[in-house]
Image: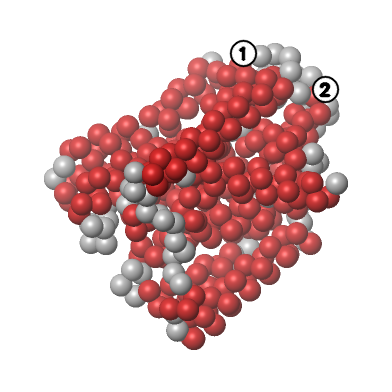
Amino acid sequence: MIVVKIVSIVLWMFVIPFCIGLIPMQWIPREKKNIGVVFIAGYLIMLPLCWVVTVPAILLVKYDSFLVMVRFFTVLIGIAAAAGIGLTALAIKKKKWISLKPAFLWKEISIEEKIEWILFLTLIALQLYKAFTLTSFDGDDAEYVAQSLVTQQSNTMYLIKPYTGGTTSLDIRHSLAVLPIWIAYIGRMTGIHTTILAHSVIPFVFIPLTYLVYFEIGKQLLHKKKDLLPPFMIFMALLQIFGNVSIYTNETFFLTRTWQGKSLAANFVLPLIVCLLLWIFDKENTKQADKKENTFGLWLLLWLANMTAGVCTSMVVFLGAVMVAVIAFWMMIAERKFSILVKAGLVCIPNAAYMILYLLLRI
């Protein structure tokens, strides 16, 4: 039974997101294509698809809304995974596919860099070990984790108070941030209790996922000094370990509330938006031919990152849009291209739609 659950976790949290993440690889620069980016892209598609299915089910289906969501979402991500595999097979057949490679080859780096990478991986292993053995419980778990459990057991979404178990009207404040529903869905498909899933399993996915984003940022910032990338990653790992200077820092959320939307938004979504903006406006490190052909894929990933912000928490929906708008405004001035501001406006459409829907529901 345990073996079956482990296989289910691997399938639903690694294999399927990876297959889904193959979809946008056709349209991004070839030097950005690697296994880690595919995994990131998979979650950038999977989580917004969850929002697209879940919110209509919450608003339109009163009874067994979670059951309806499970059926539609399973079909949708199945189609997405098949599309990723199909598009990749088609690209290989047409000889247009660039094989996915690791960011670097172990045998090509120096002894000093190998030691530094081993130290970094040791720090990650320590974080994962502590996250698993010293799992933290806080007041927010009474809302978020309990909401996932209530959803899984009652087949309804946001109609039962997680604190008391009594019925209530639709909770508008939390109902648009559907990450607890996604956790309940993974629990339903793997047969794992949502509390165990949130506290003991999800850190093994979200923590490495976050470091993949930091790794891509480091590669972009240090592309002329690649030997400094391992120290950069070690520094980021140490910041996370010793960043618990208050209960409000993103480092505290990263290691003690990994499964909560606020943590995923602060540690994954916002850094990812920065990373994508660095990629989009990178002229020096991207071949001109590649930039002309594949910029669309980067803007698409940014659009999906803005949607993922809405899955996590409503706070980051506004903050992400402001980040994109400010950077796009200055890049428009620097490059003298009004089209940059137009593209930035287009990728912020999910943010605007989310905020309008939230206001309408509150009214």
What separation in Å lies between label 2 and label 1 (alpha carbons)? 21 Å
- In the displayed structure, 168 sits above or below 317; it is above
Q: How many marks are shown on the rendered structure?
A: 2
- In the displayed structure, 36 sits above or below 227; it is above
Circle 2/circle 1 CB separation < 8 Å:
no
Residue 358: where, in percent of width, then height?
Answer: 52, 24
Quadrant in the picture for the C terminus = top right
At x 24% / y 38%, what residue is drawn? 341
Residue 238: where, in percent of width, then height?
Answer: 57, 71
Report the amino acid beneath label 1.
Answer: Leu
Residue mark closest to the camera, 2 vs 1:
1
82 or 237: nearer the viewer:
82
User: Dot 1 corresponds to which residue?
Assistant: 60
Classify residue 133 as left or right of residue 347. Answer: right
At x 41% / y 56%, what residue is drawn? 99
Binning the other alpha carbons within 10 Å of mark 1 as few (below 14), some (14 to 19) or many (20 upward) gives: few
At x 73% / y 14%, what residue is drawn? 63
**Identity of the residue furthest to the bottom in this view:** 111
Residue 299 visible in the displayed image: yes
Say whether disc 2 or disc 1 marks the residue closer to the N-terminus. Answer: 1
355 or 89: nearer the viewer:
89
Q: Which mark is residue 166?
A: 2
Classify residue 246 as left or right of residue 294. Answer: right
Residue 309 visible in the displayed image: no
Residue 39: where, in percent of width, then height?
Answer: 52, 50
Binning the other alpha carbons within 10 Å of mark 2 as few (below 14), some (14 to 19) or many (20 upward) gives: few
- In the displayed structure, 169 sits above or below 17; it is above
